[in-house]
Each structure stands twice: as structure tokens, then as C-alpha cells.
Image (tube, rainbow, N blue to C red):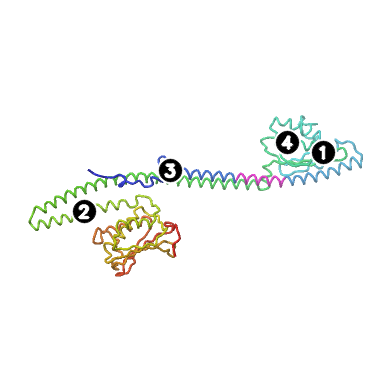
Amino acid sequence: MTGLSSSQDSPRPGKNDLLHRDIYRGIRVHHILLLCVFLILAGLGIFIIISQTHAVTHTAIASYQQTELEIVREAARSIQEYVYVHTVVLGRTDIRTIEQEIFKKFIEPIHLLENGDAWIYAPDHVVFDLSSDFPDEYRGKSMAQIFAIQKAFGASHYEEMTADVTNAREGVGYYIWLPEKGEEIAAWTPVTVGEYTWTVGLSTPLPEILDATGAGTTIMTSWLVFFMGLLAAVILFGAWLRADIRRSRSETALRRSNEQLRLLSGITRHDILNQLMVLRGFLELSGMEVDDEPVKGYIAKALRAASAIERDISFTKLYQDIGMQAPIWQNVRDLVEKQLQVLLPDTVRCTMDLDGIEINADPLFEKVMYALIDNTLRHGEGASEIRLSYRLTDAGDLLLCYEDNGAGIESDNKERIFSRGFGKHTGFGLFLSREILAITGITIRETGTPGAGARFGITVPKRAFRVRTPKKQ
């Protein structure tokens, strides 16, 4: 016959805490949520870097295209003057020879960066150096025809440029001649002298432009810093996650051990109390059967010893529950009123100024209120009034004040009353009260004046209390 209630002796702290619930081998819901947040932040970082890369690249391209355009415009003006002088003023008609001359004088000398390429096209053919090893399949063909041939080797994005060259329009853009070379950024402008028209252009591989403008270094630095930060974050997150999982597993193992110990101690305590009941019964019967006064004295001492053992066993039940459940928000006024309904006699009046005060404390906080009221009723000789109020300290903490108008507490006993075993009864009430409060960093002191009543000050740290309604003035 044990009569043990597992719901009372073995509470499971955090049972309803969804964020900290185990999913698998110490992995908890908040680990998954933090990992999701980490991945979202990493994705956001990648998005920002990509956006920055596009912006920097676009700025570098626009700036470089403007430079290219100025160069080809200057070359076009020079070519226009040269052709005008030789065809109109000098009357030359050997246009192919003139094309070679302007190619040599105005196109070939243009060198913008290492692989920048200047070129000149007539609407129906490309102008090239006859002395160079120019591919035969491109000779006598227009830009559109040449790119159509090159398309088989990966050329692309050339349609706008070939249309402008064919129709003698100025423009900027890019094209891909060979995929391995990547994008080539180009600018072009037409030259017209009489019935003759050419288009002068300049193109440069994008990687060279990025290197020359410093954009490439900026982009690489951004990615390097991001990945170094990401690597550090992954290492730190992994280390924290590993440590937290190990801690979680340890907590689970400790909780199970505590539950087993609580179960064992509950059964043992119950059995001891049963045996004490039997022992006291036999001692009382023995006292009734004997007339020898010395023997009766021994029996009385044995009964007192049994009572002391019973008090100690009861103390272990109360003490083992401290800190076993997570702190909860509690309305102080409601807790006090609950205890007053059980304890307060008609001869004692209680006034409270606690409207809206809530504290985050151990669920056993109500035992503290019980102990204070019980202390007044047991030891507050002549006490007829209990007062509860609060105020905020200069540090922003909450000070709960419990006062009575009883005999008060002697100066020498102001700290001793919180010691285990002090007092005329069990001596556990105020001792347990301080222990319960200490779990959540709350302190309690006796600050009353001897002879003028007891006064207990309970200091609640910031963030462990809240005021639901303003205090009435």
C-alpha cells in the first residue's frame, strides 16, 4: 500500500515547451528553427552579394562603354576627314585602297587593354588587313554573315549589333564570339562620307574590364569576406549545436535519473511514514499498558523522536519539488487571496496594494505566501493586520513588502529565521521560502523593527515581473 501519485511526485519540467521538445536523439525543435533562420540569413547574404555583383558589373560596363564610345567617335571623325579629303578633294575612287589606309592609320593603332579589339565594317563586308592571315571564310562578308558562320562555334547575342552596323546606327552592347572568352563589351558608331558608309567599333572581354576598373577585385573581396564569415558562422553554429545537443541529452538523462530518484524516494518516504505510523501506534499502546513512570518517559521520548522523523520526511517531500518545474508568470494578488481563504482568521485583517503585479517565479511561490502568513499567525503575537504592497527600487527592481503589526523579530534572529530548523515548529517554512525564491534570483530579507511588527522585503529582478495595470495613486 504505497498510495504514491506519480503526477505529484514526478512532474516533467518543460513537457509543454514545444520549442525545446526532443525530436530525435537530443535534436530539438528550436535547433531546426535556428538552422532554418541560419539558412535564410545565408540565402539573404548570397542574394545581397549577387545584387552587389550585378550593380558593380553594370556600373563598370556602363562606364567602360562610354569610354569605348568616345574613342570610336574620335576615330570616326578622323576617318571622315581623311576619306573626305581623299575622295572629294583629291578625287580618288580606289575605295578599297582607302579602306586599307584608314584601317592602318586609324583602326589598327587602337589598343584598349590587352585584348581590346578595334574593327571597321562596311554594310556588306568587313575591312581587314590584307597582309594578315585573315580567315578566308570571312572575306567579303558582312558582320551578320560572319556571325551566322560563327554561331556554329557558340556565338550569340550579336543581333542588335549586326542590325546597327547594317543600318549605320550608333550603339553599345555586348556579344559572345567564343563561349570560353565570355561576354565582349562593345561600342560602335557610323562614318558616312558621300555614298560611302562604315561602322567603327571597339570591343573588350568583360573580365579585362572588371580587372581594369577594380570591379573584379571588389566582387572577389565581397565573396571572400562572405564565405569566410559563412564558414566561421557554420563552425560556430555547428560547435554550439553539438554542445547544445550534448547538453540536451545530458538534461534528458538527468531528468530521467531525477524521475527515478523521485519515484524511489516517494515510495521509500511513503513506506517509512507507514512504518512510523505503526511504530507510533505500538508506542502509544505500550504507554497505555505500563505503569512504570521511567518507561513511560522513554516511550514519550520515542514518540517525540518519531514525530521529528516524520517532520524530516515531510521536509524531503517539499524540498525535492523546488526547481523541478519551469518558472511561470503568477498574479501575486490572486496567490495571496488563495492563501488567505485557507489561513486567515476573522481576527486578522489584510490589506493589499498589488493590483496587476505578476512575477515570473517557481510554481511553488504560493508556498512562500503561505509561509509568511503562517509565520504571522503563529509567531506574530497580537497581530491583527497584514499589509502587502510594492514599489520600484532605484535599480528598476520590484520590491514586494509583507508587513504585520505583531511583536516583530529580534535583530539577532533576522537572518536565523531563514535557517533550517529554526523556530518553535518545523522550522522549514522560511527556509524553504528563501530556497524557492532563490531558484529564479529573487531574494527575501526581514527588515522590520522589533516590537513594531515583522516586515519582509521580496526583491524581484527586472524582467522577472510585470505590471498589468498602472498602480493607483
Crowding at label 1, few (<14), some or many (≥20) Cα neighbours within 10 Å? many
**Magenta highlight on residue 63:** yes
Crowding at label 3, few (<14), some or many (≥20) Cα neighbours within 10 Å? some
Query: Which quadrant of the figure has residue 144?
Result: top right
The residue carrying mark 4 is 158
Residue 1, position in %: x, y? 22, 43
Label 2–label 4 contact, CB within 8 A: no
Question: Comparing marks 3 and 1, which lies closer to the viewer?
Answer: 3
Real-space Cα distance between discs 4 and 3? 56 Å
Question: Comparing marks 2 and 4, which lies closer to the viewer?
Answer: 2
Which residue is outermost to the front?
346
Q: Which disc is residue 28 wearing?
A: 3
Residue 332, position in %: x, y? 38, 57
Residue 94 sits above or below residue 20 on the image:
above
On the picture, is 399 further left or further right than 198? Answer: left
The residue carrying mark 1 is 198
